[in-house]
Image: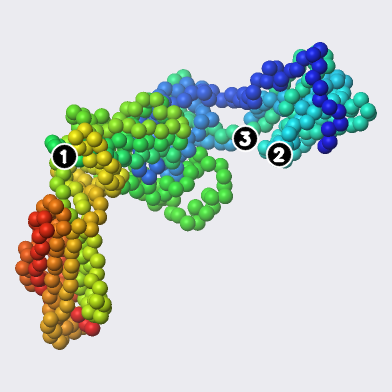
Amino acid sequence: MKQLLPFKRRPTLKIYHMKKFFPPLLVLLFACFSGAAQTLPVRTVTVFKNSKSLIHKTGKVPAKNSQWSTTELPAALFGTFWVTSPTDDLASVFSRQDSVEVKTTPNENAVLLEKNIGKRVTILLSHNTGTPAYTVIGTVEKVEKLVSDQPHFPNNHRVYLRNAAGQWLTFNAYQIEQIEFAEKPNLDFETKVVAKKTEETLSVNFKSSKPEQEIGMLYLTNGVGWTPVYSLTLADKGKSRLSLRAEIANDAEDLGNAEIRLAVGIPNFTFADRPDWLMNFMGTWQQQDRENYNFTNALMSQTANLPASGYAYGEVLTPMPGENFEGGQAGDFYFYTIRPGNFPKNSRYQYPIFEAEVEPSHFYDCQLPPAGPNSFTSYYEQRRNPNEPQNPVSHYVEFTNPTQYPFTTGAVNILSQSAGVTYPLSQDKLPYTPPAAKCKVKLAQTPEIKVTHGEGDVERKGDTFRFFSRDYDEVKVEGQVIVVNFKKESVTLKIRRNIEGTLLSSEQKWDTKQEQATLRVNPSHEVEWVVELKPGEEKNWKYSYKVYIDL
């Protein structure tokens, strides 16, 4: 639409901004049930690392005609919603979807112009496309409400304006940015209209007619999760320190100052991948669920996976120095229990859990390729290839968990502190570690320690072993390992290998661990050589084993 008349401000006119006369968009619900505004306080929240949480609420609610109702339906997951009554007064739980009346504010500019038909105005319009705004001047002739099936534009209006030349202008009310009246406008009118809105209601029915009831509500929901973040500071003198902080994200609902229980363990919520039927009125997924699942078994399985609402810990541990939580255990889970304070929806916390002194030991690690019946192809390829295979060596620190609770798997930032200066070293995964067990974390890969390894068959006996109606040859294998330390300090080097066969001998002492309860033709062993190397020192040794093959 082209600009018909220039927009000139006149000192005799007053400019009225719409926000001075009208409140922002406001929706007022008519309460059609008793106790709709009553909210049960959250008492405890058990948070798992897969962003699911078990929310437990308790409190007293007003009951009218043996019923308490609320429109605040929780986003409960299937098979986990549970309402309890300590006095055994619960009769049933019911949910429904209603069409209710609401008072809402229509387009404010449209209402203002409709109540000022026949008055002269100067209006600043916008295209809403990034182009500059423009003005129109004229007399308000008509405001027409447009009927639309688009939910984003329920109250759109078209304005008809006639200018001094007799031309008619039309535009949508949502384009109006500012209105200037040549005289005082009529402001005496109601800006609220009645409309219909779909609303869900949850009702709890009681056996008695007491005016107040105490209830509990337990359900699993998405949107609250936690992740552990560790910091390991290696000190050149004295003991090193391991710190754990919990990063907690809440995108589910306001949790108030609830007690937060951070679960350490692997959860199993088999059917909690969709909304609970009581809370969801979209019928498209219900038929599919009926076809794909046995819901009797689903409910039994899901209930078995839920910790009890009382969380009967086998043992509750009081905090020690450096700890900012209470510990407890239930079943296969350990819980860090914290109280961070107010925890509203769409917020995050980083909360210190503990600090502990640890005594890490440094070592270097090399994992050789596995050996067994299937590795003979690689032996022949090595003979044809003049280049030695690379065996990378990595630097690790290892320490014992000195606390009375497990370390949960998480990211660990590794720092070095020397002469009051802190240096970043690495970031690795700290594995799950029970109390008194050892854990190791990787610092870096080093090129200053070289490991060379080779092996081959030295003896073969045909058809010496029969296993499940199959004949196998017995092959003796010999190998050799050469290690060199190019570093300026002494190091401990651990060389590990999985060998499928029967171990015979090793010139360097090895620690072995055999796989149990297996039906393999050849037993499987984990072997480890631990070698102490001085600066510039080289060591080499031979070993042997036998293996049955059917090549």
What amino acid is found at the position of numbered circle 3 in the picture?
Thr
> Which callout, 2 or 1, points to the residue nearer the camera?
1
Q: Residue at x 81, y 16 (%)?
A: 10
The secondary element bearing badge 3 is classed as strand
The quarter in which the N terminus is drawn is top right
336 on left or right of 171: left
Residue 469 place in picture, x, y as percent: 20, 83
> Which callout, 1 or 3, points to the residue nearer the camera?
1
Q: Residue at x 46, y 19 (%)?
A: 211
Q: 337 or 101: which is nearer to us?
A: 337
The quarter in which the C terminus is drawn is bottom left
The secondary element bearing badge 1 is classed as loop
Q: Residues within 10 Å of mark 3 (few under 14, many from 20)?
A: few
Give whichever of discs 1 and 3 has the lower sequence position.
3
Q: In the rendered image of this protein, does residue 324 appear above or below residue 369?
A: above
88 on left or right of 418: right
Q: Which mark is residue 198?
A: 3
Query: For mark 1, what is the residue?
Result: 236
**Cα–Cα span, label 1 and label 3:** 66 Å
Colour logic: rainbow
Query: For mark 2, what is the residue?
Result: 129
Q: Residues within 10 Å of mark 2 (few under 14, many from 20)?
A: few
Q: 52 or 142: which is nearer to us?
A: 142
What amino acid is found at the position of numbered circle 1 in the picture?
Asp
3 on left or right of 308: right
Q: Residues within 10 Å of mark 1 (few under 14, many from 20)?
A: few
